[in-house]
Image (spheres, helix red, strand yellow):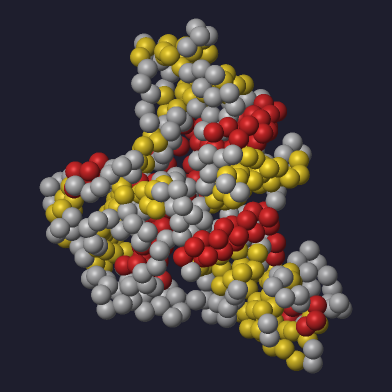
Amino acid sequence: MSDQPQTRNGPDLTGGIPANSLAEGVPFLGHVQAEPVILVRRGPEVFAIGATCSHYGGPLADGLVVDDTVRCPWHHACFSLRTGEALAAPALSPVAAYEIVQRAGQVFVTRKRAKPGSVRRGARPGTAAPRSVAIVGAGAAGNSAADELRHLGFEGDITLIDRDQEAPYDRPNLSKDYLAGSVQEEQLPLHPSAYYEERRVELVRGRQVTALDVDRKRLTFDDGTTREFGAIVLATGADPVRLAISGEPGPPVHYLRTLADSRAIITSAEGARRAVVLGASFIGLEVAASLRARKVEVHVVAPGRRPLERVLGPELGDVIRGLHEQHGVVFHLGGKASDLTRGGVVLEGGERLDADFIVAGIGVRPATALAEKAGLRVEKGIVVDAYLETATKGVFAVGDAARWPDPRGGGLVRIEHWVLAQRQGQAVARTIVGERTRFTDVPFFWSQHYDISINYVGHAERWETIEIDGSLEQHDGIVRYRAGGRVLAVASIFRDRENLEAELAMENEIGGVHG
């Protein structure tokens, strides 16, 4: 072992460590000038990069090394060990990379390298790349598509359009830490405005696209003006399902999709005593947890027997219910709201719940109106092929609005995950510049409930059996959803490494199908 003084970030790597202390493919944590750094041996090479994920600060020392990359255990961002570049969402920024010297059986970190440029190494757009790209929707998928186009060296015009005056921002935080009050609004933008200016991405915000001519690739805006582009990416997302109940004017009813929506809920929560959340979805329960952090009494109304049972199964559903009940949430399950009253909500069985305000999280619908009007194929989403392209060449759809072939079988799927939408944006950018490959990324999402995070990888709309390792009640377990002898999906609580390994196994399975 090194005789360098030990700290919570390991030894000082500038003083050197024995080369034989580095196991193949296992991150070794140390520090350089008080900054945490990992060393990773891959064959005869040793790499050194920053140890803190640029997304939410996850510990890369606990991550999974795959080839010459490392994946974050928290939210599965992927970084190059050679350059520190962020290769896969949800990370948008690189981590530092360092120079290495090996001599006399020791490994020394000498200095930090210059930050990677805005164009990724080896990126060369093909000659068939269009001269301009319009991206309709500046959410996860749209922002990532614009980012990746520039990373790949695309020099044409990029126009990023959204009806939201403040997009792009970190949408998952709207129901989590921002709503809970632990993250400030200035932390929400995905990039500062100067970032888009420097990369020549035109942001058109607060404008609605009202028509699409797919043959001419022409967009019509809400003021009647039109513009034509070489390629168009539809990243229109999804819209909340609205309540279909009558009643006298009652408490404010909120939906949560935009920053403005989250602000409105925060305003209602100020000085409020009780809120009713309709729907025990991920959004509904995350809102419940955030409102409890603000000391608001919360009642959750949902038709199912357990929260999230359809997605996560009964065992994990019971654990999630218990976790929320420990924090004071009151559940009213097996029914729905039937009416609103001046002071709250009336349930189907006649029970009345007082409420100062209501949050409805009863699902979303893909925003497909623009695509339908344009004559594109729409079946529970905008239908695209394995390259995320519609039947019209040069017109693509990504994110919550898209429905594409599941690479693990099972036909067309539409999945509403932030990370998946980001990765689809990155994939469609690669196709646009000529790196045409099938989109085969394994879906991943996380859901935060108080101090417990659930990581879920894969996709299981239904399953035959559920296998549980560890103890979900003790918040240390993993759930495998199986059908036909295959693991379709894995959910975990504080089993981050196993979740990463499950993702890799699913990728290898897909590689075997398409390889």
Give x and y (percent) for residue 427. Answer: 40, 63
- Quarter of the rendering containing residue 196: bottom left
State left or right for residue 306 relative to residue 122.
right
Give x and y (percent) for residue 447. Answer: 57, 43
Q: Residue at x 47, y 12 (%)?
A: 348
Position above or below: 311 against 144: above
Position above or below: 407 against 297: below
Q: Nearer the viewer, residue 385 or 399?
A: 385
Q: Residue at x 50, y 36 (%)?
A: 283
Q: Residue at x 45, y 29 (%)?
A: 362
State left or right for residue 281 relative to residue 102.
left
Give x and y (percent) for residue 188. Answer: 48, 50
State left or right for residue 204 relative to residue 270.
left
Q: Nearer the viewer, residue 56 or 371?
A: 371
Q: Nearer the viewer, residue 59 or 26?
A: 26
Residue 287 visible? The answer is: no
- Quarter of the rendering containing residue 332: top right
The quarter of the picture where the N terminus appears is: bottom right
Residue 441 visible? The answer is: yes
Residue that sits furthest to the front in the current view:
484
Q: Residue at x 25, y 75 (%)?
A: 128
Number of numbered discs on residues: 0
Give x and y (percent) for residue 351. Answer: 53, 9
Residue that sits furthest to the bottom in the current view:
104
Q: Nearer the viewer, residue 287 or 75?
A: 75
